[in-house]
Image (tube, rainbow, N blue to C red):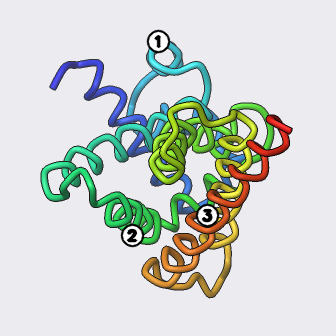
Amino acid sequence: MSDSNVTKRALAAALRELMEAEPFEKIQIAQICQRCGMNRKSFYYHFRDKYDLMNWVFDMDFNAFTKESASILRPDDRWDLIERICEYFYANRRFYRKALQVKGQNSFSDHLREYCRPLIRLRISSLVDSEAVDDFVIDFFSDALVCAVERWLLDKDCMPPEQFIFRIKRIIQNGAKAIYQETTEMTEG
């Protein structure tokens, strides 16, 4: 592992530890650096701000998770992958509950939404047998999915991932077809 990744992982571990004890908004970069014995200059060499670090934590964890999942799942196991993603969020919900509470510029919610858009585009395109799915439809379902994940994980009685995905699956499959048909009819007619 390169020195850069070692430094980034140390900063990420420090952020995770700090987020166990206090809200993200109260965490300062100086605290993150102190926790892992680095100076602020090292932090800013790798990250723009603490939001960038938080998003990097997700990206690295999620990339490792998807690589592992890709070796297990067949390409047509889309729902199994989504269920595994929900299991990942559920298992790491302490961190993501705090991450999802951060609002404003560079929020984790915005980062997650952008991450989901291409995945949703692929899924809806396969459901409606069309390469050209309107951005409005993709934005609608991206917003809906991120909002649903937020509500699910932030609920103090967070339901198990299997239950959550069962509900999401039914809504997405039926809703995507109906919305696509309606928007297509509206633009053609």
Q: Which residue is mark 3?
A: 149
Question: Looking at the image, is mark 2 or mark 1 nearer the viewer?
Answer: 2
Q: How far separated are the C-alphas under marks 2 and 3? A: 12 Å
Q: Which residue is mark 1?
A: 45
The amino acid at mark 2 is Glu
Q: Nearer the viewer, residue 181 or 15?
A: 181
Secondary structure beneath disc 2? Answer: helix
Q: Residue 189, image x and y in percent?
A: 86, 39
Q: Residue 107, image x and y in percent?
A: 69, 40
Residue at the location (39% across, 31% down)?
37
**Which disc, if any, is residue 14?**
none
Secondary structure beneath disc 1? Answer: helix
Q: How far separated are the C-alphas under marks 2 and 1? A: 33 Å
Q: How far separated are the C-alphas under marks 1 and 3? A: 32 Å
User: Relative to residue 125, is residue 85 drawn left or right?
Assistant: left
Residue at the location (63% across, 71% down)?
171
Q: Which residue is mark 2?
A: 87
Q: Quadrant of residue 29?
A: top right
The amino acid at mark 3 is Val
Secondary structure beneath disc 3? Answer: helix
Residue at the location (51% across, 59% down)?
95
Q: Residue 148, image x and y in percent?
A: 67, 65
Marks counted in the figure total: 3
